[in-house]
Amino acid sequence: MTTPPSLPRARLPARTAAPAPAHPLARPAPAHPPGALGDSQVLALWLGIFDLKSPATARHYRTQAGKFVLFLQLLHPDWAPETHLQQASEQDVAFYEIALLRKPLPGGALLDLTLPEQALAALGLQAQPFGAALKKSSVNQALSVLNALYEFLRTPNGVMTWPYVSVNPVRRVRKSDSRANRQTDRHLPLEGIQAMNDCLRAAIAHARQGADAKALARHERRLWIFTLLFGLWGRREEISKLSMGDFRQLHDGSWKVRLQRKGGRQEEVPAAEWVVRGLRQYRASLGLPMGWQLDDPAPAVQGLRLAGGRSGTRHVTAQTLYLEIKALASETAEEVACGVLLPGHAPERRTLLAERLARCSPHWFRHSGPTIAINSGAMSVENASKMLGHASLATTTQMYYHADEQQTRSGLEALGDQLKATG
């Protein structure tokens, strides 16, 4: 259940006593001039932009912004209504991050942000908003939303003739503690991708040898999911919505795939021949013919066969893709760690790679593919950016292109060799 962007103070419960050292920033609120914009109004202005462009994004942003306002109201019950966004400091944002992670404060105490049942009902919530700890990636995303909000609030526009806030309290907190590195450290080297491929094909061969039809069907589908994610660099939501008819062959023999991007827009991206071979192999495993029509609505990834031989006709969920890749990554990590896969690698190297594989999720393929393609010289950054569906090349270079340190070292060694040759 989403939290509204503006939460009336009258609906909030009385704040329980907070640990004394936890919050030294209580200070009188500045007078709120009659007729001036307040938190609710500026939030409505900001969210209105996204309501027009992408309702799904607007809902997500409304939830994140409303949750932060609620946190500030609980942390500072003495502040004047409609001024919490104006008064928030870097320390408040740091406390918010701690609350989302459910970590103790420096003194060892936990922030008490539990809402009574009557308060939950008044706010339209079914669960405690700060009950369960979030993953670091989810906290990073929440802070990114708040960073965008405050960048909007400190920039005058056609409605706000002066900035609503003078500084962005999220900016430095968001960049601290190597957060950017944690956000982008989600990719595998080529040897990790190859290990997953080898693990899958060995599992398929074993299932065929043992005549295990159920296991064979699962591994064939898992191989196809792996091929789609690594070959198309799509988000798992995009891959889960694919239909057979989204694959089409052009007059020159090349292939394209139609993806449903964020905001409902559709975009065609090139498909390599090995991806199309993967589709044919998957169709063969389902007993389907090699050809298909452009308007074929059958899901590109289908549910496993049900009792009686019936196959699912609905699209699988993004969660199904997540669970399948997590299972594959876990199995691959175990076989790499014990040396069944990559036996020629040093044990230390296998241990590090196994740790990364254990953390792998579908989104890692969206980072790994561009990194490998760019570093190997197989694709330019510009083409990789277009393949990813990015509107800005900066997004590709900052978030999806990961420098290859080994390639950098080799380049520096080559420079040194040239220096020796000329000397």
Image (cartoon, rainbow, N blue to C red):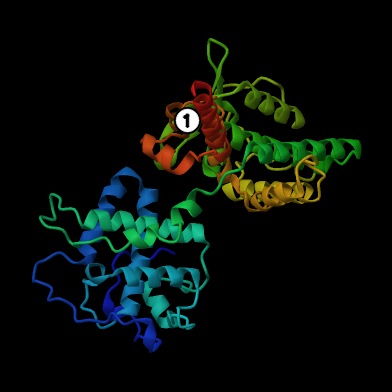
Residue nearest the observer in this picture, 93 or 132: 93
Task: Kindly tell me whether residue 299 is visible in this rendering.
Answer: no
Looking at the image, which residue sits at the far top? 252
Q: Is residue 190 above or below residue 52?
A: above
Where's the N terminus, which quadrant? bottom left
Q: Is residue 372 left or right of residue 79?
A: right
Q: Indicate the position of residue 263 as horizontal and vertical percent values.
A: 39, 42
Task: Kindly tell me whether residue 170 is visible in this rendering.
Answer: yes
Residue nearest the observer in this picture, 165 or 7: 165
Label tally: 1
Residue nearest the observer in this picture, 80 or 4: 80
Q: Indicate the position of residue 52 as horizontal and vertical percent values.
A: 29, 45
Q: Is residue 251 left or right of residue 263?
A: right
Secondary structure of the residue carrying numbered label 1: helix
Q: Which residue is rendered at x = 53% and y = 22% of the image?
A: 421
Looking at the image, which residue sits at the far left? 34
Q: Quadrant of residue 312?
A: top right
Q: Which residue is rendered at x = 84% and y = 35% of the image?
A: 205
Q: Is residue 376 above or below residue 77?
A: above
Q: Amino acid at mark 1?
A: Ala
Can you identify the residue that label 1 sits on? 384
Q: Which residue is rendered at x = 22% and y = 75% of the image?
A: 81
Residue nearest the observer in this picture, 96 or 240: 96
Q: Is residue 255 above or below residue 310?
A: above
Neighbourhood count class around disc 1 (C-alpha, 10 Å): few under 14, some 14–19, many 20 upward: many
Q: Which residue is rendered at x = 42% and y = 68% of the image?
A: 97
Q: Indicate the position of residue 247 as horizontal and vertical percent values.
A: 57, 25
